[in-house]
Image (cartoon, helix red, strand yellow):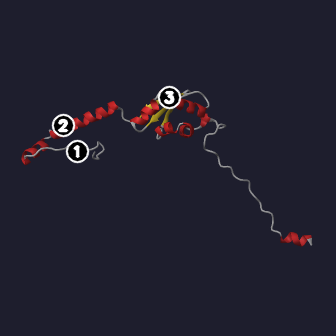
Amino acid sequence: MPAAAAADEPPPAVVAPAQETPDRSISSDTDIADAGTEAIWRRVEQLLMAKHPSLAASLAGAVICRMDNDRLTIRISGSEFNLKRVQRPQSIEVLAEACSAVLQRTVSVDIAAECASPNGARRTSQENQKRKQRALRHPLVEQAVEIFKGEVVDVKLSDPEGGSR
């Protein structure tokens, strides 16, 4: 009766080999030179989060804006506090070590700031004062003050894009 028992068994299932999904992360055996700057920066961030989390937090939103053979320029966006934290010699050294480890070669790091510098903030403040003075001297404003025998208490500036400040 072995033939009858074989007829009652379901046919063997055909199993296709599992499809491997390509790993998009950078690993030590990946050719780093072919990886994009975003992937390189993600790997640098991972290294920094593991070893230097406070520095990694200061680099939130940073990007590699230029990559030459042995030099990376990293653009920092955010507060002046973050910029100063990243510009410390010790921070640049740690950042260069992390970048070198990911790229598997020695690189140096330059920092480019996207946040407002104190001079930029001072310049903006001076520009705003000039704009307020122009508004106070505007003929319609002077006429309204004279007609209503009033005084201007505050001047609200609008953004150059059209919003108010």
Q: Earlier in the sequence, mark 1 or mark 2?
A: 2
Q: Nearer the viewer, residue 94 or 139?
A: 94
Q: Nearer the viewer, residue 5 or 58?
A: 58
Q: Residue at x 56, y 37 (%)?
A: 51
Q: Nearer the viewer, residue 153 or 109?
A: 153
Q: Amino acid at mark 1?
A: Lys
Query: Which numbered disc, 3 or 2, marks the residue closer to the eye?
Result: 3
Query: Which numbered disc, 1 or 3, marks the residue closer to the eye?
Result: 3
- Disc number for residue 104: none
| Left or right, residue 152 beside residue 78 | left
Q: Quick check: can you spot residue 117? A: yes
Q: Earlier in the sequence, mark 3 or mark 2?
A: 3
Q: Residue at x 23, y 44 (%)?
A: 156
Give coordinates of residue 137: x percent, y percent: 14, 38
SS for dot 2: helix
Above or below, 11 relative to 127: below
Res 29 quadrant in image: top right
Give coordinates of residue 57: x percent, y percent: 48, 40
Q: Amino acid at mark 2?
A: Gln
Give coordinates of residue 154: x percent, y percent: 19, 44
Query: In whole angstroms, how far apart are the C-alphas of marks 3 and 2?
Result: 45 Å
Q: Quick check: can you spot residue 114? A: no
| Left or right, residue 31 beside residue 143 | right
Above or below, 164 relative to 95: below
Q: Residue at x 71, y 53 (%)?
A: 18
Residue beneath label 3, please?
90
Residue beneath label 1, please?
156
